Image: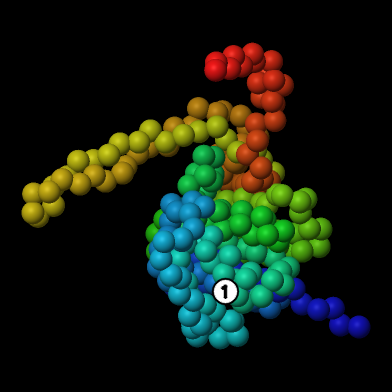
Amino acid sequence: MTKKKPTILVVNDDGITAPGIKVLLEEMKKLGRVIVVAPDGPQSGMGHAITIGKPLRLDKIELYEGVEMYKCSGTPVDCVKLAVNRIFKGEKPDLCVSGINHGLNYSINVLYSGTMSAAVEGAIEAIPSIGFSLDDFSHSADFSHCRPYISAIVEQVLANGLPKGTLLNVNFPHIDKEIKGIKICRQANGHWIEEFEHRLDPYNREYFWLTGQFEWSDRGEDTDVFALKNGYVSIVPTQYDMTAHHTIQELNSWAFNFKS
């Protein structure tokens, strides 16, 4: 009896024409039936935003041979929601993969990332989900060193599944680093020191441009930042339950004084 090929939903936040999604869908075609639903333009930094104040458009397009593709006017999370509800009609794909993002999604960046939020939405829908990102923002980024690791990681997820409520955050070092292997990591404790550059447009009206520098104070050798800086592919098991369980006992000791 021939084993049925898995159905794989491919999404991203850089837009449907981004080079990263092309590499990802090419690798997924080797493993199963691929359906792509991606934003019609860049949606980086959208986090888990959804569209509620205007209509969404979902148009089937022919961009790459042998792949069913749709462009969506909404956010990366909108793409997953529409895929599940309108394309799969409530039937769940076997896997949801997001990326490959142009730029890392390590440490605190996971909260802002449209790439990771699409994968998180997949996990919320009880679909085994993975977000992939590369340390290269260039449109001409070289993803060739990522390909064998993508296939190896996806094959393991398809074979073993993932615990309920979890997904994988996978980051690749830049092409100029020799990949030494894979490290299972925790998310590093880091944050952005942000600045807003003040500028004037041609009409002398002020506007602001967000800039900043990532500060990494966590020097643990078990973090995603350490792994990537030292030439490893980082895998962080991630969850969407944001409860600070270790704080519940302390809060239960507080005396709340209610005043009438």
> Which quadrant holds residue 11?
bottom right
Q: Is residue 2 visible?
A: yes
Given residues 160 and 173, the one toward you in this image is 160
Q: Is residue 133 visible?
A: no
**Residue linked to disc 1:** 36
Q: Is residue 81 left or right of residue 32?
A: left
As drawn, 258 above or below 105: above
Given residues 11 and 83, the one toward you in this image is 83
As drawn, 146 above or below 72: above
Name the spot of residue 178 as percent of width and height, x first: 57, 51
Return the residue found at the far right: 1
Q: Secondary structure at mark 1?
A: strand
The quarter of the image holding the C terminus is top right
User: Image point 70% across, 65% down: which residue?
Assistant: 95
Q: Is residue 117 left or right of residue 199?
A: right
Kindly identify the amino acid type of the residue bearing the numbered disc 1. Answer: Val
Given residues 172 and 191, the one toward you in this image is 191
As drawn, 64 above or below 13: below
User: Image point 57% across, 35% down: which residue?
Assistant: 188
Name the spot of residue 6 as percent of width and height, x first: 75, 73
Q: Is residue 174 left or right of residue 122?
A: left
